[in-house]
Image (cartoon, coloured by chain):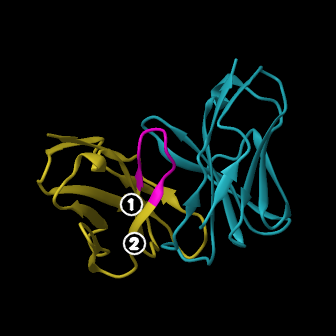
Chain colours: A cyan, B yellow
């Protein structure tokens, strides 16, 4: 069964802290994504990766960076957390590059920055 | 810019049929996908339209008209468990997908 896991369901961090969100998929997918989800705004793409060590900016990359050292793992890094980064963070993966290819989502990490 | 517009809320009764619309403003769209998300859960894939027309999967159908930049998701024989948020998603030749703001469907007994 297809599985995407995220390191934490809930996380509370202080302003200025460096935050790591981890995502692991077991489907050997080439493509992995990080989104944030806020009420009324839907899912917004932060970064995505189409191969190991490869990354591309999404629509809202400011304040974030990513790392993909292994195919199955994609990390989102908040270099210096701020309160406006309080949100639900969703990781997803898929195979292929088609716009209609199914994305498999993890359960999400609800991050609160105080 | 690129955007997908969806009504924020829809209410329907159990057993009925409901249509949730998605209009988009973008060039070079290669198709539309639909995802369901229950409260507190992860989005799950429902269907996609790579070509114009209607695609049916059980109680769910999805429609796309690229000339009208419009699509919809149709749910038949509504059940209480269908209460969820529904997102349309689209993109071009790359992996950079855009999601709509979502429609919250409330199914009432």
Q: Quadrant of the C terminus of chain B?
A: top left
Give left or right: position of B46 versus A80: left
Confirm whether residue A75 shows in the render: yes
Chain where mark 1 sits: B
Give the x, y percent position of residue B68: 26, 70
Task: Say what secondary structure mark 1 lies in.
Answer: strand
Q: Looking at the image, is A43 positioned above or below residue B56?
A: above
Magenta range is B36-44
10 Å neighbourhood of mark 1: few (<14), some, or many (≥20)?
Answer: some
Q: In which quadrant of the rendered view does residue A31 lie?
A: bottom right
Q: In which quadrant of the rendered view does residue B55 lie?
A: bottom left
Report the residue marked by disc 2.
B48
Give left or right: position of B86 versus B18: right
**Magenta run includes residue B73:** no
Report the residue marked by disc 1.
B25
Give left or right: position of B80 versus B84: left
Q: Residue at position x 55%, y 77% from top?
A: A98
């Amino acid at each position: 069964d297809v599985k995407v896991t995220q390191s934490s369901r809930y996380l509370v961090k202080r302003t200025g802290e460096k935050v790591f969100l981890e995502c692991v998929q077991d489907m050997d997918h080439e493509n992995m994504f990080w989104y944030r989800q806020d009420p009324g705004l839907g899912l917004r793409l932060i970064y995505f990766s189409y191969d190991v060590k490869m990354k591309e900016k999404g629509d809202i990359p400011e304040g974030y960076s990513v790392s993909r050292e292994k195919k199955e793992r994609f990390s989102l890094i908040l270099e210096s957390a701020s309160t406006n980064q309080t949100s639900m963070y969703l990781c997803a993966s898929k195979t292929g590059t088609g716009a209609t290819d199914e994305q498999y989502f993890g359960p999400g990490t609800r991050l609160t920055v105080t | 810019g690129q955007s997908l517009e969806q009504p924020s809320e829809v209410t329907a009764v159990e057993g009925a049929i409901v249509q949730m619309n998605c209009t988009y403003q973008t060039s070079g769209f290669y198709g539309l996908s639909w995802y369901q998300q229950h409260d507190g859960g992860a989005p799950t894939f429902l269907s996609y339209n790579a070509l114009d027309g209607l695609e049916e999967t059980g109680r769910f159908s999805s429609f796309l008209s690229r000339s009208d930049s419009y699509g919809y998701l149709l749910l038949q024989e509504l059940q209480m468990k269908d209460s969820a948020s529904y997102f349309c998603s689209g993109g071009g030749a790359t992996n950079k997908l855009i999601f709509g703001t979502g429609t919250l469907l409330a199914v009432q007994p």
